[in-house]
Image (cartoon, rainbow, N blue to C red):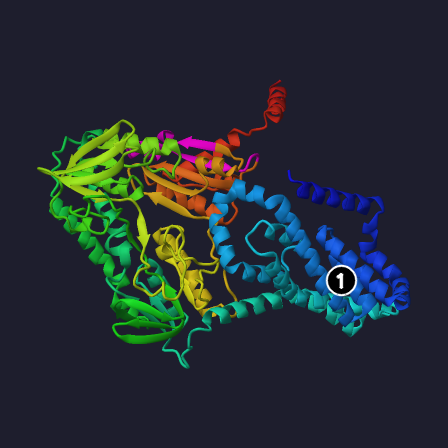
Amino acid sequence: MSIKKVAVITLIALAIAAWFKFDLGVYLQFDTLQQRVGELRAWYDANPALAGVLYFALYVAVTALSVPGAAIMTLAGGALFGFWYALLLVSFASSIGATLAFLVSRLLLRDWVQARFGRQLRSFNAGFEKDGAFYLFSLRLVPLFPFFVINLLMGLLPIRPWRYYWVSQLGMLPATAAYVNAGTRLGELDSTAGIISPALLLSFVLLAVFPLLAKWLLAYIQARRVLAPFERPRRFDANLIVIGAGSAGLVAALIAATVKARVTLIERHKMGGDCLNTGCVPSKALIRSARIAEYARRAPEFGLEPMSVRVNFRQVMERVQAVVKTIEPHDSVERFTSLGVDCVQGDARILSPWEVEVNGRRLSARNIVIASGARPRVPDIPGLAALDYLTSDTVWELREAPGHLLVIGAGPIGCELAQAFARLGTRVTLVTHAERILPREDPEVSQRVLATLQAQGMTVHCRYEPLRFRQEEGQRATFDTPEGERELDFDRVLMAVGRHANVEGMGLEALGIPLTASGTVVVDEYLRIRIPTVFACGDVAGPYLFTHMASHQAWYATVNALFGRFRKFKVDYSIVPWATFTDPEVARVGLNEHDAREQGVPYEVTRYDIDDLDRAIADGEAHGFVKVLTVPGKDRILGVTIVGYHAAELLAEFVLAMKHGIGLGGIMSTIHVYPTLGESNRFLASEWRKSRKPERVLSWVERYHRWCRS
């Protein structure tokens, strides 16, 4: 440790020791101030210059040492010196003291913190170097956190001392003025009757409302700062422009039209977006056909004669498209036009915070919602572009089943499609670079699904990293594996390695709209982007790329866009369910064991195996389990994982319970129809109760019953 650090630590230790030795804290209590205000004012009248110097030095010391009491000293300054003199003293003393505390934190702690947590703080440091002064000004202007905490934390971050000083000087001035004014009124009290004087009451009202006023002012300044380079239209064509007619965009337009706002919906391809055309709907239709084929193969299990399953792949894919066509009117231009939505087809480009260009037309609206969705991510692997590869967007164009399908990516999309094709007669090889399939689930869940896939004839390789593709008498891929390079032959390859937000070509770069590390648009807790008139929701905003989350976010984005001037709503991510529609299905909400351990959350596990459930046995689906994590010693649910037949349907009861604070005791006491799969939830809750039965009490109850029989 350097001599400078030792000296600073010694000086601080001596100052704190003196503080407690002489009990100086008693002078920073409100009761002491009121008792001695007259005495102090008399001494100030006799020694005005010395009083000012001593007060200034003491204030600097209090703030530099981060000792509680600066607020009382500010009130005392107003009471002793009057408004203007006290404002001058406190304003400079608080800023100097804050800067000293900042420098002490920087000297003693910054190097250690940055060395230990530099990787985690890298993006935060970069953002703070760019806009650190504005963040500091915000914290000073809206005093939500104690100023001494801000001083200590800012010393760890990249901001220059001089900038820190003058930003603090400006940012703390309004709050300082409010406190000094209250102290001035306090010093004018001649009797207890003066406590209810209008002037004093007004001073304390100002103290109470100042944070709200400052927050509003800060938001106004920030908005003006961002919007200043653009010319605002005198009149708007619509209240809302929605870019993208997928799940998020359709819900946003529907909400806006329902509340009688004029809304323009822009879609460059097909209404309904990915979910209707290339995602949820066609994949579930394909999975259904594949499941029926599997049931036919299992005919003897149900007392039927063995069946010869002959898959007409073309008819399967035509059925998939027929399902899409049946649902299509729900999302059609005709329906939304009838609801009052102006539907426009074309590529949208945002020109300003209020204007969008499409098909050469310049449209304006008070607010814009970006709901442009996402598309399959295709990694840059040598040789891949030369192949006629498939993605979850293009696989629906197939009318002839591949002989051997190589699926790269073992997340939900890869596993669902791989199993469906395997059940429809295609030889399937599933490959992932991860340690296991479905890596976001608990290991036992991954292992159970893996065992099913392998039992159905699929080949699965984990820790296979694709290196290159080539065509030599067919198609071949080379992988880096733990055993060295390995080659796999295939007829068609399906890339299922995630999705990428659609952010290109909309003018976001020109407007300086930042993206996250995963490529989604940066939004705040109200789903606003950097420009306060523009919101984003759905896959383009993240972090959950689910259709139901897109609809959920769309409500918040639309309501905040249309009515945010009156009240804004923070998007709620507290209870987020999702499901993978393999067989067995995997459904989940909240924490699983893997996440709880990583986050250090204490938990207890209760489990019920579905192979004991009457309805599952009757249906020939007696496999899987329900696993619930609860707070230790309580029935409050932290998370649920269900693996088995119709797991996604069973999850809904737990989602409702978590949302409304219903514990396992409430589920156990609820009547469930017999025989249903839903009984598994009640049996799970009963298992939780049985594992916590009061053995000591029951032993006395047993004695009571023995006595009754005697």
Residue 59 visible:
yes
Position of 219 with respect to 627 (left or right) is right
* Residue found 17% across the figure and 50% down from its top: 319
* Residue found 83% across the figure and 51% down from its top: 26
Q: Up-down: is 541 above or below 224?
A: above
Image quarter (top left, top right, bottom left or bottom right) of the C terminus: top right
Inspect the magenta stretch and tell me whether residue 616 lies in it. yes
What residue sits right under mark 1 in the picture?
A: 74
Q: Nearer the viewer, residue 600 or 661?
A: 600
Image quarter (top left, top right, bottom left or bottom right) of the N terminus: top right
Q: Up-down: is 238 above or below 105?
A: below
Where is residue 321? Give x, y as percent: 18, 53
Q: Nearer the viewer, residue 148 or 707?
A: 148
Residue 291 visible:
no
Magenta region, residue range: 606-633
Q: Nearer the viewer, residue 486 or 44?
A: 44
